[in-house]
Amino acid sequence: MSCQYNFSAGPAAIPHEVLKKVQSELLDWHGTGMSVMEMSHRGKHFMPILDETESNLRLLLSIPENYKVLFLQGGAITQNFMVPMNLLNDTTASYVVSGYWSKRTFEDAQPFNGIHLSASSESIDYKVPPNYQDWKYSNKDAYIHYCMNETIHGVEYFDVPIIHDVPLVCDMSSNIFSRPINVKSFGVIYAGAQKNIGPAGLTVVIVRDDLIGAADKKTPTTFNWKIQSDNKSMINTPSTFSIYVAGLVFKWLLQKGGLKSVEEENIKKADYLYNFIDSSDFYYNDINKNNRSRMNVAFRIKSDELTSKFVKEAEEDGLYGLKGHRIVGGLRASIYNAMSLEGVIALVNFMKKFQGNN
C-alpha cells in the first residue's frame, strides 16, 4: 500500500500544502519560465526569495536584530566542527551529552584542544537528560553545547538554563519551530533542515553578533561564520531550492498562527500517543515523563520479536517510517509539525489492532 502517513525521523514529511505549492511552481516560478532550482542565486528572482525566507524565519522566532541568520550546507553535523572553529579560539568549551547525537557532537569536537565533558546521562541509557544544576563548566569557557531534542532516544529539554556568563550553543535540529523559544537565551542556535524546516541540504545557523569574528585562522572561508555573514551566506552557491521550500514552510507556519498555535497542536499529538502507550501492557516507553520528546516518540513492544512484524504490517496499512534507529532498535514515531493529529490517531488505531491480533 502507498504511504498515507510518514513517521520518518528525517528526511521527514513536508506539509502537503507546501508540496502542492512546490508542484505548481516547479516548472515556472511566477511567470519566469524557470524553476527555482535553475535560477542564479544572485539573480533578481532568487534574492527576494532569500530575503523573504529570512524575514519570515526571524518573525517566527522573534529573532533580535543583533543576531545573524546563516543558510549553510553540510547538515547540522558540519557544525560539530564549525562551532569550535568559530568560537573556541584557544580557550575551552563544555559539552552536555544527553543522547546519541550530542555524544557524537562531543566526540567530533575531540580533535580541538580544550573540549570538556560537562555532564552525561549515558550511564542510565539516556532515560533522563542531565539536570541543568549538574552541568559542570568554567566561567572562562567559550561556550556550553547541548542538544535540545534527541531523535534516537526520544529525550527533550523543555526549559532553558539561565547561564549569564557563558554562551549557550544549542543543536535544535529536530525541534526548532515546534514551539516558541527565547532566542536571546542562546549565543548560537543551529538546525539541519530535514525535520521541521524543509528538504535535506540546508542548515540554519543563528549567531549573536558578538560571537562572530573569532574564527581560527585555519578556518576555510566556507566554514567561517563571519565571511558567510558578510556575504549573505553566498561565499559559494547556497542550497537554493531547499531555501525556497523552507520559505514556503515558514509561510505555512505563520498561516497556522505561529509557533504558539503549533505548540498546542504538537502537545495534543504527543499526549494522544503517549497516553495510549502508558495505558497499554503491550507497548512501553521508559523515558522520564518530564523529558519525553514531543517530536520523536520512541517505544517498544514487550515482545521484541514482534517489532519487525509491526513495521511490516504498519506499512501495509500505509504507516511508514516506524522502525527504530539501528543504534537502539525498537520503534519510533516522529511526529514533527507536518504530521497531523489524524495521522497520530491512525497510528494509535493500528497499534490497538496489532495488539489485539498478537
Image (cartoon, rainbow, N blue to C red):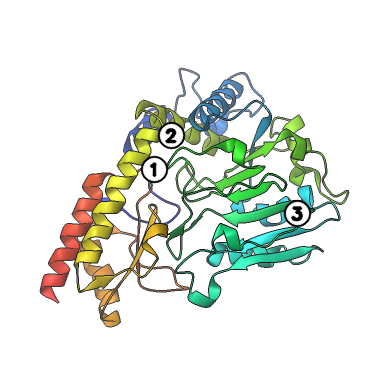
**N-terminal-most mark, 3 or 2:** 3
The answer to whether 8 appears left or right of 139 in the picture is: left
Q: Amino acid at mark 1?
A: Ile
Q: Amino acid at mark 3?
A: Pro
| SS type, badge 2 | helix
Question: Which label is found at residue 50?
Answer: none
Image vertical order of residue 43 relative to residue 288, above or below: above
Q: Which residue sits at x=60%, y=63%?
A: 134
Q: Pointer 1 and pointer 2: residues touching (CB < 8 Å)?
A: yes
Q: Which residue sits at x=65%, y=49%?
A: 169
Q: Nearer the viewer, residue 313 or 32?
A: 313
Name the residue carrying label 2: 249
**N-terminal-most mark, 1 or 3:** 1
Q: Residues within 10 Å of mark 1 (few under 14, many from 20)?
A: many
Question: Which label is found at residue 84?
Answer: 3
Q: Amino acid at mark 2?
A: Val
Image vertical order of residue 16 relative to residue 89, above or below: above
Q: Residues within 10 Å of mark 3 (few under 14, many from 20)?
A: many
